[in-house]
Amino acid sequence: MDRGYHKLARDSVGVVKYADDFVIVCKTKEEAESMYGKLKPYLDKRGLTLAEEKTKITHISEGFDFLGFNLRQYKTNKCMWLLIKPSKSSVKKAKETIKNLFDRLRGNPVRDIITELNPIIRGTGNYWSSEVSKKIFGNLDMYIWIKVRKHLKTLHPQKPFKWIYKKYFRPDYTGISKSRWILTDPHDSRTQLTKMSWIPIVRHAVIKYKNSPDDASLKDYFEKRDGKEFVRNNVYSKRKLAKRSNYKCRICKQSLVGEEPFKINQIVPNTLGGEQRYDNLELLHQSCQKQHYTLLESYGGGKDLPKVCTYFENKQVKPNSQEGYRLMKKAFKKFKYQYV
């Protein structure tokens, strides 16, 4: 079998691995059963054993769970069709997480619910969004709606639902959704509960064979992939910051998409009166931000940055201003960062 650059022998088996989980795809049941004997020497040599409760032989038409998804081939009028959906156990786990959150925050203000629930909705939804998940998104939105309604009735047991809806539900402030029934913090109309059904289903595009980030001719290809990946997995505020830097860290010039976590960094720090405004924020890798703070304190004369304060006074510029941000960015270019 020849698939582009992939050449497979016709009698070969398929192996899919992730950490300590793996699936072996065989053509017959007898071949699958023989894998136990072939795996045993390999595992014994490393002091490992197969987990009996997670190990089984099954036909693809019956399906199996792997990494939170259920893979099963369904019969249609014309052919067999493989569908990958979130597994029942992963959906159940997501509902339990939501239920526990509402139990823990029982009686708390709506802002607390929204703040803690939004990352769960986005994180779970983004993980499932590359497969057949739209119907499950709708089911979970309904489950959350029931929990929200119960929570609001607990907060205001003597008030009618009409009063509750008027106080807590507003249209989408961004105008993206046409729904007029979005749970909103009554003290801040920009703090709203997101919905899982808003997350688009986008199939994962595998990196083309032999394509490497080290290939300078493929720079645009990987920058485009990084942008799409970042947008899928992050909230709007972080997307906005990342887009300004072309999804790269200012210090190391490497992509913000990857295993290393990133942090929101203030260009003019709190010490100098800097505020949490978009113009004063940037995204840096965690290690790069740590190095940045070390150099800033070193060049600034200590934690209170007295030399930087004197610099702004001499320039007669307020640190927390557009000109202040510009001067700080200009100064950063002179920092001697150590690139690894």
Image: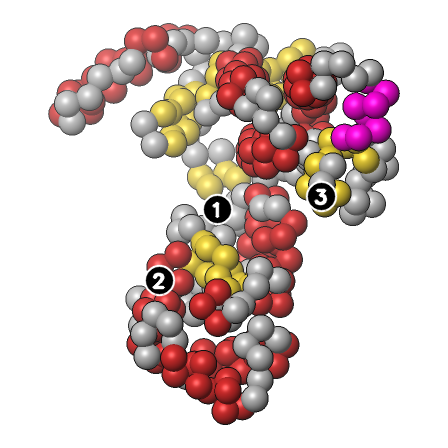
Q: Quadrant of residue 122?
A: top right
User: Which disc, if any, is residue 290?
Assistant: 2
Q: CA distance from mark 3 to mark 1?
A: 55 Å
Q: Is residue 96 above or below residue 178?
A: above
> Which mark is in front, 2 or 1?
2
Report x, y in % for residue 328.
50, 78
User: Which residue type does callout 3 highlight?
Assistant: Asp
Residue furthest bottom in the image: 314
First along the sequence among labels 3 and 1? 1
Disc number lying in front (3 or 1): 3
Could you say which disc has been placed on residue 5 in the image? 1
Question: Considering only vertical position in the picture, is 219 above or below 153?
Answer: below
Residue range (magenta): 161-168
Tell me the amino acid under the disc marked 2: Lys
Q: Position of residue 126 (x, y in %)?
A: 59, 36
Q: Is residue 186 above or below residue 281?
A: above
Question: Is disc 2 placed on a helix, strand or loop?
Answer: helix
Q: Nearer the viewer, residue 64 or 146?
A: 146
Camera-nearest label, 2 or 3: 3
Instruction: Identify residue for label 3.
Output: 188
Q: Is 146 in front, or is 133?
A: 146
Rendered-image quadrant of the C terminus = bottom left
Q: Quadrant of residue 109?
A: top right
Mark 2–mark 3 CB contact (< 8 Å)? no
- 67 lies left or right of 54: right
